[in-house]
Image: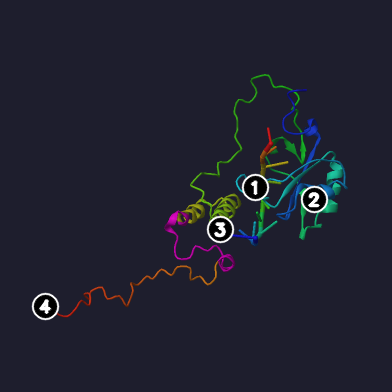
DNA sequence: GTTGAGCGTT
């Protein structure tokens, strides 16, 4: 039993993963454990966080031992107000090991070494969404890129839109780079941050020579 | 110091 100790309890194949959505950003796993532990035996609770900022993404994964307990948690805790937000509990469908999960249950033996010759095709499921493009320490800019771009990319597979808006991120952004008017009103005062005067200064006597003294000559 | 559709890490 020294090989099956991956990253969790050895009873991983007999667990039921639940997905908890609409979780508050400040809700911790301990808070969820206090609720989900009432419905049954909770094996583990994981809250995916951002790899860079470390903030919660707003959802969590609760793993139960039995299905009836998990189902009870779904029926009981689904719609429950936690930390001001009504959470949504449902069975997990996708994930790193979603292929080995059947209706929430992981039907795969991990304690049996495959020896060799099985599936040499390491189908990678990890997407390379993160690309280092120079992270600055600016707070607004950091969250703007993280919450907006990365989220939009996973939400919509529209490459066209992704490329187009990413194009603006590079500095080709038009005068209005605001996602929504609400976002702009929250993060900006009056929008007069820096008025790009399209027209040159109207009152700029460029052609006029300096008002030097009249006649330098006596 | 904010945000809010969705599916995961040692």
Categorize mark 2 by other alpha carbons within 10 Å: few (<14), some (14-19), many (20+): few
Q: Mark 3 = which residue? A: A140
For image coordinates 85% across by 46% down, the residue present is A37
Q: Residue A54 carries which label?
A: 1
Gap in angstroms between the C-alphas marked 2 and 3: 29 Å
For image coordinates 65% across by 19% down, the residue present is A116
Gap in angstroms between the C-alphas marked 1 and 2: 18 Å
| Count of labels in the image | 4
Q: Tell whether label 2 touches label 4 (CB within 8 Å).
A: no
Subunit that carries the residue with mark 2: A
Q: Mark 4 = which residue? A: A217
Gap in angstroms between the C-alphas marked 3 and 1: 16 Å
Q: Which of A107 and A62 lies nearest the eye of the viewer?
A: A62
Subunit that carries the residue with mark 1: A
Q: Give the range drawn in magenta.
A: A168-187
Q: Which of A119 and A206 lies nearest the eye of the viewer?
A: A206
Q: Is residue A76 above or below residue A194?
A: above
Q: Mark 2 = which residue? A: A31
In front of the other: label 4 or label 2? 4
Q: Which colour scheme is used?
A: rainbow
In front of the other: label 1 or label 4? 4
**Comes first in the chain, label 2 or label 3:** 2
Subunit that carries the residue with mark 4: A
In the displayed structure image, the side of residue A199 where residue A138 appears, left or right? right
Same chain, labels 4 and 2: yes
Q: Tell whether label 4 touches label 3 (CB within 8 Å).
A: no
In the rendered image, the quadrant that contains the C terminus of chain A is bottom left
Residue A61's spot in the image, x, y percent?
A: 74, 45
Residue A152's spot in the image, x, y percent?
A: 58, 53
Same chain, labels 1 and 2: yes
SS at mark 1 in the image: loop
């Amino acid at each position: 039993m020294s090989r099956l100790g991956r990253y969790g309890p050895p009873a991983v194949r007999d667990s039921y993963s639940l997905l908890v959505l609409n979780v508050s950003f400040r809700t911790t796993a301990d808070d969820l454990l206090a609720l989900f532990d009432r419905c049954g035996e909770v094996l583990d609770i994981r809250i995916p966080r951002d790899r860079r900022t470390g903030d919660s993404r707003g959802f969590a994964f609760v793993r139960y031992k039995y299905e009836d307990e998990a189902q009870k948690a779904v029926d009981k805790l689904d719609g429950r107000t936690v930390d001001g937000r009504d959470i949504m509990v449902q069975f997990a469908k996708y994930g790193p090991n979603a292929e080995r999960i059947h209706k929430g249950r992981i039907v795969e033996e991990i304690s049996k070494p495959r020896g060799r010759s099985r599936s040499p095709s390491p189908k990678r499921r990890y997407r390379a969404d993160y690309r280092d493009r120079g992270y600055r320490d600016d707070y607004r800019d950091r969250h703007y890129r993280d919450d907006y771009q990365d989220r939009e990319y996973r939400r919509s597979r529209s490459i066209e839109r992704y490329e187009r808006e990413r194009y603006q991120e590079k500095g080709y952004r038009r005068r209005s780079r605001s996602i929504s008017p609400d976002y702009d009103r929250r993060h900006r005062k009056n929008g007069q941050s820096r008025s790009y005067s399209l027209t040159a200064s109207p009152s700029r006597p460029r052609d006029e020579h300096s008002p030097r003294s009249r006649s330098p000559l006596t």
